Amino acid sequence: MFTFTLWEIIQIIITILAVGVIFSGLVKKPQTYEDLLEGKNNVLQDLKFAIAVAAPAVIFHELAHKFLALYYGFSATYVASWWGLGIGLVLRFLAPGWIFFIPGYVSISGAGTALQYGLTALAGPLTNLILFGIFWLLLKKDIAPKYSAIWQVAKQINLWLFVFNMLPIPGLDGFKFYSSFF
């Protein structure tokens, strides 16, 4: 029931890598004292760190839309937004420190109720809110302090994605969710 096409998997992998590159300009892997002494500045380490903190927020958001849509009997396919990823990459290199892009979306079709469509729209931001809560709890309980830098950045990214996506602006999940009641 929860199937992916090969093209969807390829698009997800491309999205993960692009999100990593985009965020690697904003979030850097914290350096150890030894790294600073040796003058290390590893671009690959920054990329891996950015993928670890940002890609799950984006991918789990979209997968929540897909899985709930499939549960309701809709057709649902992940689609990378080539324009959105391109804008993100251009901003990464031309306007460092400023990020705005739409990495992808889930194309949904089929007959259903307005409530089903509204809840499907809510599934992505709600996933980000849950992830925010998990990372907040990991930090508060000091679980795996070795990864606290990852937890901190991932917590902030998920909170930002939740708030942004719940805005009642056409095209965003919040607009689709709120519109489902009218």
Image: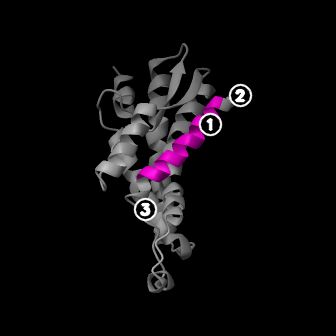
Residue 119 vs 34, above or below: the answer is above
Q: Amino acid at mark 2?
A: Met
Question: Can residue 4 be seen in the rendering of this structure?
Answer: no
Residue 49 vs 9, above or below: the answer is below
> Marks 3 and 1, how far apart in space?
26 Å
Residue occupying the far top of the picture:
111
Q: Secondary structure at mark 2?
A: loop
Q: Secondary structure at mark 3?
A: helix
Which residue is painted at 37% across and 59% down in the image? Answer: 26
Instruction: Please tell me whether mark 2 or mark 3 is closer to you in this view.
Output: 3
Relative image position of residue 78 (x, y in whole percent): 56, 31
Residue that label 1 marks: 10
Q: Amino acid at mark 3?
A: Val
Mark 1 or mark 2: which comes first in sequence? 2
Mark 3 or mark 1: which comes first in sequence? 1
The quadrant of the image that shows the N terminus is top right
State the mark number for residue 153.
Answer: 3
Residue that label 2 marks: 1
Looking at the picture, tell me which residue is in the foreground, 18 or 12.
Answer: 18
Q: Which stretch is magenta?
A: 7-22
State the mark number for residue 37.
Answer: none
Magenta stretch: dominant SS?
helix
Relative image position of residue 144 (x, y in whole percent): 57, 73
